[in-house]
Image (spheres, rainbow, N blue to C red):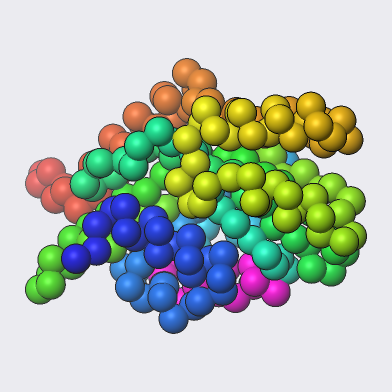
């Protein structure tokens, strides 16, 4: 039985290990993917509709640009919501294939799930990816990437462990000071919460019949 937790784990497997065949078990055929990006270091389309387009964006195109990717969900416990996960911070560590440089990024996900008819499994109906930072670090031999990925549990990463491990790495190796901005997860501010409530209200209107004249 596919649950929100298992869908999130399967998403990381599909994206990080470039396994497009898994996507049809994760996303509904008419799923919607949206992005908000607060950096000019990476770009994605604002909106993608449908399983094929989402697979191309998140797996095929992404996999040609980046390798050795690990995506971490930063939380103390697995989200238990059945239908919706409002904000789930993430951290990504990967290699930019063309330039052989480290990419380190942070942001948050929003997920909306729906139950399939028949087998009762859950699927992703809508997903939003916010990218707060996506820094580029020289790392031609890949040793920094290996050290960072090896220090963190994957894919579920408690915030306290992230903080502890990155602070230890910075103390041992001062050149890793760029980790300071990434040692804590994305924090939702009041504006983010207001937008989330507005988005939730808008989502609730989808499918409601219009008032008759």
* In the image, residue 50 lies in the stretch drawn in magenta: yes
Looking at the image, residue 97 sits to the left or right of residue 82; the answer is: right
Q: Where 54 falls versus 192 (above or below)?
A: below
Q: What residue do we see at 58% from left, 45% from top?
A: 152
Q: Quadrant of residue 122?
A: bottom left
Q: What residue do we see at 18% from left, 61% from top?
A: 115
Q: Nearer the viewer, residue 116 or 143?
A: 143
The residue segment tinted magenta is 49-64
* In the image, residue 59 lies in the stretch drawn in magenta: yes
Q: Quadrant of residue 78?
A: top left
Q: Quadrant of the N terminus?
A: bottom left
Picture coordinates of residue 100, whole percent (x, y): 85, 63
Q: Main secondary structure of the magenta part?
A: helix
Q: Quadrant of residue 164?
A: top right
Residue projecting furthest to the bottom? 21
Picture coordinates of residue 11, whole percent (x, y): 44, 62
Looking at the image, residue 23 sits to the left or right of residue 207; the answer is: right
Q: Nearer the viewer, residue 144 or 212?
A: 144
Q: Nearer the viewer, residue 38 or 165?
A: 165
Picture coordinates of residue 25, whole percent (x, y): 33, 73
Q: What residue do we see at 42% from left, 53% from top?
A: 127
Picture coordinates of residue 86, whole percent (x, y): 36, 37
Q: Where 178 falls versus 73 (above or below)?
A: above
Res 20 seen here: yes
Res 37 seen here: no
């Amino acid at each position: 039985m596919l649950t929100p937790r298992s869908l999130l784990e399967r998403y990381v497997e599909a994206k990080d290990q470039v396994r497009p065949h898994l996507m049809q078990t994760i996303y509904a055929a008419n799923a919607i993917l949206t992005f908000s990006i607060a950096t000019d270091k990476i770009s994605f389309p604002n909106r993608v509709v449908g399983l094929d387009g989402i697979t191309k964006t998140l797996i095929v195109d992404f996999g040609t640009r980046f390798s050795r990717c690990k995506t971490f969900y930063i939380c103390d416990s697995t989200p238990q919501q059945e239908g919706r996960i409002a904000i789930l911070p993430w951290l990504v560590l990967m290699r930019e294939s063309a330039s052989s440089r480290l990419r380190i990024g942070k942001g948050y996900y929003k997920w909306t799930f729906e139950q399939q008819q028949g087998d009762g499994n859950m699927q992703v109906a809508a997903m939003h990816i916010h990218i707060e930072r996506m820094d580029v670090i020289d790392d031609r031999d890949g040793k920094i990437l290996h050290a960072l990925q090896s220090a963190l549990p994957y894919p579920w990463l408690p915030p306290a462990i992230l903080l502890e491990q990155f602070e230890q790495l910075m103390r041992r190796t001062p050149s890793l000071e760029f980790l300071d901005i990434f040692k804590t997860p994305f924090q939702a501010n009041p504006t983010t919460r207001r937008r989330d409530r507005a988005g939730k209200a808008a989502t609730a209107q989808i499918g409601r019949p219009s008032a008759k004249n």
